[in-house]
Image: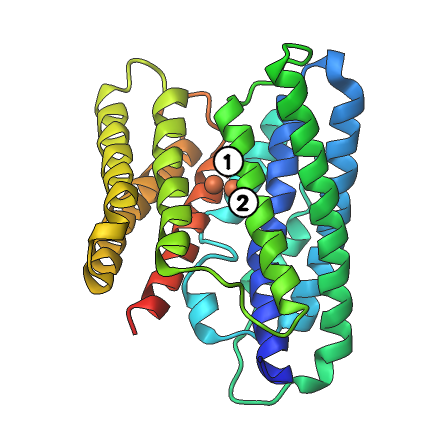
Amino acid sequence: MLSRNEYVRLSLEINLFFQRIMKEHLFFIETSLPPAAANLMLDARRLKESFEELLHETVFYANGVISNETIKAEEIVTPYTLQAEEITARLTGAMINTAITESELALTGNDGEDNSCLFEVVNSINERAINLVSSTIALKREIIRDQRICDLFIFLYPLLMEHITREAVYFLETLEALQESRLPRRSLCDELNFWNTIMGEHAEFIDGLLDPTEKALKETAAKLADKFEQLVEGCKNTSEKRIVEESTKTTKQVQEYKTAATNGLIQCQIRSIIVPLLGDHVLREANHFLRILMMLSC
Ligand SMILES: [Fe+2]
Ligand SMILES: [Fe+2]
């Protein structure tokens, strides 16, 4: 059972990370649909805007409440996020509220204060996040269904659609647990395999979205994907200490790779069909996983 103070801090931290992830998924959907799917594009845009509103409010209440470790992890915002957003908005013509990013860059951590008094307001943020993420899951599943029967075309791989749906379900399960004042019930291998699969798939997506001439970058991505696949396969037969260590090692490698890729995309030094915000998005997911791994190794 979480104390009210823990509930407030953990809820705000998880919302800051995942609400941004959700609104970016919706942005990627919005900008990857062709004119024939104008209705779905509008649905994605509306949901993205609702998440932006909620995220702006969440950032306001999170200031001075979340842990310094969460801020330092660069999972909420990285030094590249703002620039990646500005370039991506200009290139796609779709809106991104960068005022949120600026408030996030100014966030400060908790210095030991008790914030139980925010219980009601955080409870309301969690409830609204549950509603929005449920609608987001429904939209993603609709796209997956229509894409499978070739009734819809979208410039996103079917596996990428499934991947972002899994991330949304993970967020929803976490919120539902928090609303029962507890943490989600996941075994070590459940948790590690979820994120190691996510990391491996990022490497596969990057491999598939790089220009065929980017041979060195593609080769590194393919090798990283293999390593994550092995970690998932080996989890059950490896000691807890060792699997956490190896996951950390490989995730640090992918973090370094994604940092270089995001920077390269911003500087226009990489031939690809990847927008800079997608680079920054997958970098933040690696940063978040590394913070989970740090907590698991204690
Ligand atoms: Fe994601
Ligand atoms: Fe992801």
Q: Rate crowding at label 1 as few (under 14), some (14 to 19) or many (20 or more) other CA atoms within 10 Å.
A: some
Q: Does the Cβ of the disc 2 residue fall within 8 Å of ligand 1?
A: yes
Task: Give the residue number, with chain letter if any, for mark 1.
Answer: 163
Q: Is residue 173 above or below residue 215?
A: below
User: Which amino acid, by three-letter code, is at mark 1?
Assistant: His
User: Which amino acid, by three-letter code, is at mark 2?
Assistant: Glu
Q: Quadrant of residue 212?
A: top left
Q: Which residue appears at 28% of the width and 20% of the height? A: 214
Question: Which type of secondary structure does the marked residue at label 1 adopt?
Answer: helix
Q: Quadrant of residue 222?
A: top left
Q: Left or right: 142 with respect to 295?
A: right
Q: Is residue 267 above or below residue 196?
A: above
Q: Is residue 94 visible?
A: no
Q: Left or right: 195 with respect to 230?
A: right
Report, in whole angstroms, how far the alpha carbon at label 2 lies from the one at label 1.
Answer: 6 Å
Image location of residue 12, percent across then percent down: 62, 68
Q: Are marks 2 and 1 in contact (CB under 8 Å)?
A: yes
* Quarter of the figure with the C terminus: bottom left
Tell me the colour scheme of the image.
Answer: rainbow
Q: Does the Cβ of the disc 1 residue fall within 8 Å of ligand 2?
A: yes
Task: Give the residue number, with chain letter if any, for mark 2.
Answer: 167
Image location of residue 15, percent across then percent down: 62, 60
Q: Rate crowding at label 2 as few (under 14), some (14 to 19) or many (20 or more) other CA atoms within 10 Å.
A: some
